[in-house]
Image (cartoon, rainbow, N blue to C red):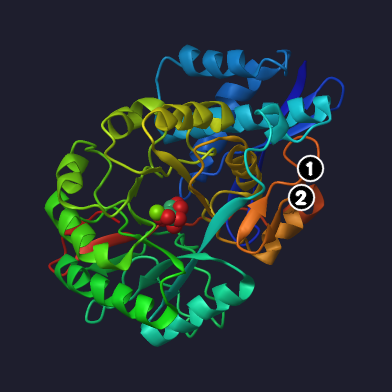
Amino acid sequence: MIRTAEVLVSSPSRNFVTLRITTEDGVVGLGDATLNGRELAVAAYLRDHIAPLLIGIDAQRIEDTWQFLYRSAYWRRGPVTMTAIAAVDVALWDIKGKLAGMPVYQLLGGASRDSALVYAHASGADLEDLGDSIRSRLEEGYRAIRLQVAVPGMGGGYGISSARESGGRYTYEPAKRAGLTIEEGWDTRRYLAYAPKLFEWARSTFGDELILLHDAHHRLTPNEAARLGRSLEPYDLFWLEDVTPVDDPEALRLVRKHTTTPLAIGEVLTSVWDFRTLIQEQLIDYVRASVTHAGGITHLKRIFELAALHQVRSGSHGPTDISPVGMAAALHLDLAIHNFGIQEHMAHHTATAEVFHTSYSFDAGAMHPGDAPGLGVEYDDLAAARFPYEPAYLPAARLRDGTIHDW
Ligand code: GCO
Ligand code: MG
């Protein structure tokens, strides 16, 4: 039986919301409830509306609890609700694993592979800077890398972190610690002209073996997206991500007609119903959702199983705003499912590791969740107390004439 459900908000280099469920017998489960830039909305949803419902229920009833929280809310889906439900679901899987004395991936059917291939980020203010960033990722052992670079004449672009600007670290963190949204510029024409040059340079400098990915971050119309996909075909991308805004899944029909560049979509989608058209019409190659935002292990597994029927593979979202708890949950699922594709890995800051003690490991470009019972993550309250919440927002993009655009 569940005795307590506590909502923990901390900010060890960035904000995280964590749900901690404790049973009458003192078994503790953790769930990630971090929704970048809207953290406190999920914290309130959990604290004010979900925690009171959990007290006294059987912690072993994972599926029933998921269905109860989803159906009894009446108001369905959406990132706040699905992140809150996910946190409960993941905490209950953690508890079940600890009760069974097994890592969560064993409860999900056991390992389907030795480890999960991950991709890192490399970015730069120009190609020289990007080259240094790629080399440092290769030295760390990554075999798959997402490339983003500032577009000349545009004053930046999506996903750029320059070592020169950030004091030697290439870590891209989109949420800016500020009370207000920061605005960036965007110019689609310049971007479309530059993207093929970036990948031509990358292939001629780093060869054919390296697995390359790219994120267009929702900024293109279907026709622009089709043109980008086609122009990148010679460079053999593992995937091209979020080419169009996700509000309109049918837009991908046009993109698909014109390019064979593999498409990955869905880090802002939260349910199997959001993915249904994309998967059943085979409009995408990779499902980009996360355990944290798409209803937990129970629901993301459901999405991946639908995807498997249509030869679509997984590509779980794993930026720094997925906490180490969410990352661990993703890795357990990655190891267990059959249609695994790749896992994103943005290494967390050292301050984050002071609060979240993890059991997962990285070796030669792949990760393993570890064999500790449950998820294998512990939360350090004393360390967390040193890092109180600080408001942080994702940026917005504006076109040259001042029009607000998709970010
Ligand atoms: C990715 C992303 C992220 C998001 C961020 C928003 O592919 O990893 O697009 O960097 O922008 O997670 O919260
Ligand atoms: Mg993305």
Q: Earlier in the sequence, mark 1 or mark 2?
A: 2
Question: Which quadrant of the picture is home to ligand 1?
Answer: bottom left
Image height of 69 relative to 359, above or below:
above
The residue under label 2 is which amino acid type? Ser
- Which corner quadrant holds the C terminus? bottom left
Label 2 element class: loop
Q: Which residue is depicted at the point 60% across and 37% down? A: 333
Closer-to-camera residue (133/203): 203
> Quarter of the image holding residue 64?
top right
In the rendered image, residue 223, in percent from the top left (x then y), is placed at: 12, 53
In the rendered image, residue 230, in percent from the top left (x then y), is placed at: 19, 60
User: Looking at the rendered structure, which numbered label has been put on residue 371?
Assistant: 1
From the viewer's perspective, is 371 left or right of 280? right
From the viewer's perspective, is 25 left or right of 265? right
Q: Which residue is depicted at the point 51% across and 34% down? A: 83
Q: Which residue is mark 2?
A: 359
Q: Which residue is depicted at the point 37% across and 83% down? A: 127
- Which corner quadrant holds the N terminus? top right
Q: Nearer the viewer, mark 1 or mark 2?
A: 1
Label 1 element class: loop
The residue under label 1 is which amino acid type? Asp
Closer-to-camera residue (236/366): 236
